[in-house]
Image (cartoon, coloured by chain):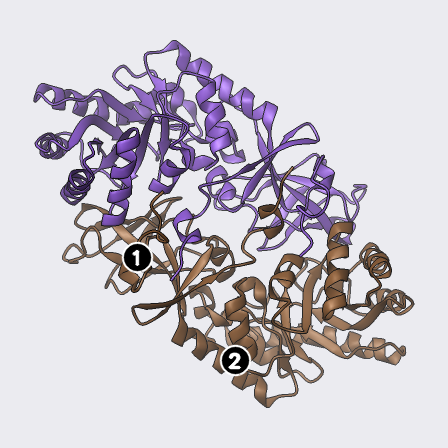
Chain colours: A brown, B purple
């Protein structure tokens, strides 16, 4: 197989085999700096979410920019992938099953590991694994603050689960979390603020309830790229789990946050069957469309009209001089699942490829070592 | 990192780390046999499409079942992944760019390689690469038979491109192809038949036009899982490029073809925040939703109501006895992009894991070897 490792290494965008996932390093660093600056000011801190990029090289830059208390992960595999970069990781998700609990306990022996729980089963499983490993695992009670997915109800139900955790010496109750995921995409700023504040009130009030009952609650964790500057300024919220801000997609672009697009899928024009239509080699296997078709960059008047598995059909003005073989950039509509389709980021400054960053936690790394 | 390779190898579904992609081998083999039987009868043959599964272990079973003239691929990397399994590969897609043309030429030195073209640029690029490699590359003129994506117009435009190919001794004109992709999802059988026949008429007529002009046209290639038994019985169509039939998704299930679901995503219940709601650890990063939410199997009355990046929120009847930690099967709505999210298939017979099949051509294999 002739591959890029046998051929000359890529030096510029023109050398890349397409489709390719490309990160614009100066834009990435600008986003990371903008977010770090925001959290340098308040008592609330940032805990960047790894699930958006799954890439240690990016997590490293986020931590280096400051204002971070550690990293947020969605899965045990993500936590394992970044465990060498920080001594403080939150798995902001329910972890269930003996093998995963054992891996959480193993991580908890290496660093300050905290994970979310919303069930007695989750608490008991973590406790048993901690006991077996001789570890102490930090726990946040996960509240449903309006998203309607995971989480116990704020108030008494949360208190009851917190009490259970408090009784188990191998677990350390570290507070509460509540992801206002339903608020992130709300376009209108006033509505977004009102909804985020309502969610944060439920979260902060529950933290108060726990403290009033004599329970520890140092961490009150919430937020995302759409609400970091709302939830992150609510008194009592101690950290924000934003992730998408670093790379930015067109969907979050609609929300009016001060971050710039920092990644794209590079494709090649493989067909121009009509003057007003080109077809690219990058389709739905290179970028998801759950938040809409990607946006074509740098070709005036171009618009993706069909986004099939292997192809993007793009309407162009008939006078557009674009030709078969030309390269085209697509801005994806949804960062996290798009990055998850690729194995590496090509890191560029302008047109120059300066590095290749493995997306270490892409997919389900456990299965890449799977064998019978 | 504690992984399944360090732990005991998976023996049953219960041993798998979730989310996991699972193929039901007896169901797969039944689908493969059903399709092979159909093509055993007619003059038209089957050329299974690798893009649906990207898995040499599955392609091998398709070839072993008979009635096949070779394999179909969408990309050069897919062709490279299955090149050791067959001596006849069609890349049913436009290949553009010097490095890819060189790889096509390299393949053409090893086996009977045919690729689609719809432009002068494509023809010239292939010819130059064939010349440089001392190879002869087979070519099909790609026609737009109604899908409105790639392809030249049937009739004179196709003849003109065919003449150009015929003039170049390093290329071998092998016929025409026309993918009636717009017809595949048409639910109503009568409408699907009418539309497929219209597309096939344009294709077969153009083949006749080429032959009338003294050009070779042994291959007339078309079809998919939704039209194999329509287009595959149109006189003059010589081979069908179906792919999804082997694994089958819920979307094709709606079309009424005689194939059974043969793969699923295995997830774990990680939360039951309300009696009527469970949450699974397998979301949009484990199965795409471009053809609708996946379908829950084996849990009466269960329905996916939200399918987020990491979670499936599932409504269940309040009396449902399902508990945190239980395993649940999701039937994906769209085979090709779902398989493309995973690195391996766990091959099962009943609950027993009998093999692990690497999805060798997942993503863009070129970038996995990428380095600076």
| Percent position of residue A79, x then y | 64, 63
Along the viewing direction, whichever of B30 and A225 lies nearer the viewer: B30
Q: Quadrant of residue B343?
A: top right
Which SS class for mark 2? helix
Q: Chain of mark 1?
A: A
Residue where numbered disc 1 is placed = A8
| Percent position of residue A183, x then y | 59, 68
Residue B328 vs A42, above or below: the answer is above
Residue where numbered disc 2 is placed = A35
Which SS class for mark 1? loop
Circle 2/circle 1 CB separation < 8 Å: no
| Percent position of residue B321, x then y | 81, 41
Say which mark, if any, is on residue A251: none
The crowd level at tag 2 (other Cα within 10 Å; few <14, some 14-19, many 20+) is many
Along the viewing direction, whichever of B89 and A244 lies nearer the viewer: B89
| Labels 2 and 1 in the same subunit | yes
The residue shown at (80%, 77%) is A217
Most extreme residue toward the right is A167
Q: Chain of mark 2?
A: A
């Amino acid at each position: 197989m002739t591959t890029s490792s046998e051929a000359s290494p890529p030096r510029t965008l023109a050398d890349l085999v397409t489709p390719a996932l490309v990160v614009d390093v100066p834009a990435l660093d600008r986003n990371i700096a903008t977010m770090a600056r925001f959290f340098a000011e308040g008592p609330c801190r940032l805990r960047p979410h790894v699930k958006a990029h799954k890439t240690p090289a990016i997590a490293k830059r986020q931590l280096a920019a400051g204002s971070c208390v550690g990293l947020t992960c969605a899965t045990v595999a993500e936590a394992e992938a970044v465990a060498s970069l920080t001594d403080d990781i939150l798995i902001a998700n329910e972890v269930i099953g003996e093998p995963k609990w054992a891996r959480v306990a193993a991580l908890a022996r290496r660093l300050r590991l905290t994970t979310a729980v919303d069930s007695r089963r989750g608490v008991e499983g973590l406790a048993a694994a901690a006991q077996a490993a001789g570890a102490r695992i930090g726990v946040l009670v996960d509240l449903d603050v309006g998203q309607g997915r995971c989480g116990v109800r704020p108030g008494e139900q949360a208190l009851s689960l917190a009490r259970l955790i408090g009784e188990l010496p191998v677990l350390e109750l570290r507070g509460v979390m509540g992801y206002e995921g339903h608020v992130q995409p709300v376009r209108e700023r006033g509505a977004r603020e009102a909804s985020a504040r309502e969610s944060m009130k439920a979260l902060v009030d529950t933290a108060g309830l726990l403290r009033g009952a004599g329970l520890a609650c140092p961490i009150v964790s919430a937020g995302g790229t759409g609400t970091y500057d709302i939830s992150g300024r609510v008194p009592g919220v101690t950290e924000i789990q934003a992730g998408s801000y670093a790379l930015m997609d067109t969907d979050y672009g609609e929300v009016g946050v001060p971050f710039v697009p920092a990644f794209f899928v590079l494709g090649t024009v493989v067909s121009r069957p009509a003057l007003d239509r080109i077809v690219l080699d990058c389709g739905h296997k290179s970028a998801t469309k759950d938040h809409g078709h990607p946006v074509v960059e740098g070709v005036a008047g171009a618009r993706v009209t069909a986004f099939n598995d292997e192809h993007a059909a793009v309407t162009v003005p008939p006078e557009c001089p674009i030709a078969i073989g030309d390269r085209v950039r697509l801005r994806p509509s949804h960062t996290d699942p798009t990055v998850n389709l690729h194995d590496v980021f090509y890191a560029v400054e302008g047109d120059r490829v300066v590095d290749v960053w493995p997306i270490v936690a892409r997919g389900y790394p456990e299965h890449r070592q799977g064998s019978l």
